[in-house]
Image: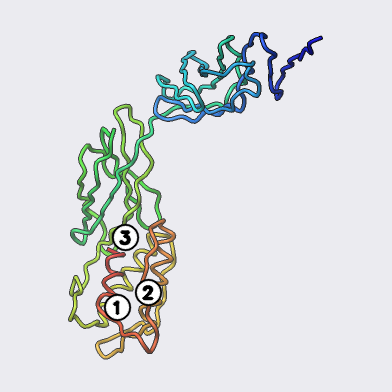
Amino acid sequence: MKNIVVATRGLGDAFSLTPGQSACPPDAPTNVVATTGDATATVSFTPPAADGGATVTSYTVTSSPDQITATDVASPVQVTGLTNGVTYTFTVVAKNSAGVSGPSLPSNAATPATTFLPPAQLIASASSPTSVTIDWSAAAGADHYVLLRSSLGTPFGVVVSQPGFHFVDTSLDPNTTYVYVVRSVDGSNNASADSERDVATTMFFTDDPLTSGVAVKAVHIAEIRAGVNAMRAAASLTPATFMDHALDSSSVIKAVHLTEIRTALDEARSALLLPSLSYNTVTAGTTGIHWFHLQQIRDAVK
């Protein structure tokens, strides 16, 4: 007598068939996870544990609400045509030659929204003791841009909303550091995240820019100290105190004068969420202080 193999199936069980036995629909997919973009969702899932004895040929995702569907041959499945701002869940069914599985458990709730980038580059620089010029790059999908400014530790406030990429911020205070960010805004008034920050200090330096052959002077150190403390004020930090506060034309510029300026500046830049700087090594008693050491700090302040 011929042995008969009985097939059983259930969640987690492999499904096998004896010769001549017909297939049945697969189990439902599991572990459904949705992530959203601009009017879209990407739905990933784990294939069914039992395929019903026939290869799964496609998966169909259905949204709730709106019953929008999308079909593909494997995970993940991209769903388009969603409405930004509406919260959706998604279920998935698997299909083989015998039919369609029941629906999976719903995914997490996910809300599509416009996702576009802020301008990739923002550059602010003082153009006078009371004005700053700001330029930024165009961002794909932007209808206009919102420029925001902070100073002396205050929250960011809107300076201007405009379609262009250039603005001169006027009626500012001298010897003050201003922090700027810009946002892209689309035609539906959806705003991007903030751009990277940039700072400008309404201060002008003696012998600017410093170049090869220019001797480092006490006035250069004094001005940089003032600029760094303006940065610290923008970050709501107390003013830094420096060794040999009253430098004059007879003073010897030492490595410690530079290193304490760098430390004070680094603290301000970190508090302002600005990129860190990399410096040339300066060793007390060994390294001479040159124009390029100071110009790097000037550039970071300006």
The amino acid pointed to by label 1 is: Ile
Tell me the residue that label 3 is attached to.
Answer: 177
Residue 218 is left or right of residue 33, and the answer is left
| SS for callout 3 | strand
| SS for callout 2 | helix
Q: Residue at x 36, y 83 (%)?
A: 255
- Crowd rating for badge 2 (residues with CA inside 10 Å; few <14, some 14–19, many 20+): many
Tell me the residue that label 1 is attached to.
Answer: 221
Q: Residue at x 47, y 21 (%)?
A: 72
Tell me the residue that label 2 is attached to.
Answer: 261
- Going from N to C along the chain, the mark reached first, 2 or 3, is 3
Q: Residue at x 26, y 53 (%)?
A: 123
Residue 114, position as x, y percentages in the image: 38, 30
Relative to 162, residue 248 above or below: below
Based on the displayed image, in which of its 4 quarters is residue 219 positioned?
bottom left
Q: Residue at x 41, y 64 (%)?
A: 268
Quadrant where the C terminus lies?
Answer: bottom left
The amino acid pointed to by label 2 is: Ile
User: In front: mark 2 or mark 3?
Assistant: 2
Give the Cα distance between marks 2 and 3.
16 Å
| SS for callout 1 | helix
Give the Cα distance between marks 1 and 3.
18 Å
User: In front: mark 1 or mark 3?
Assistant: 1
The reply to whether the C-beta atoms of the residues labelled 2 and 3 are less than 8 Å apart is no
Residue 294 is left or right of residue 238, and the answer is left
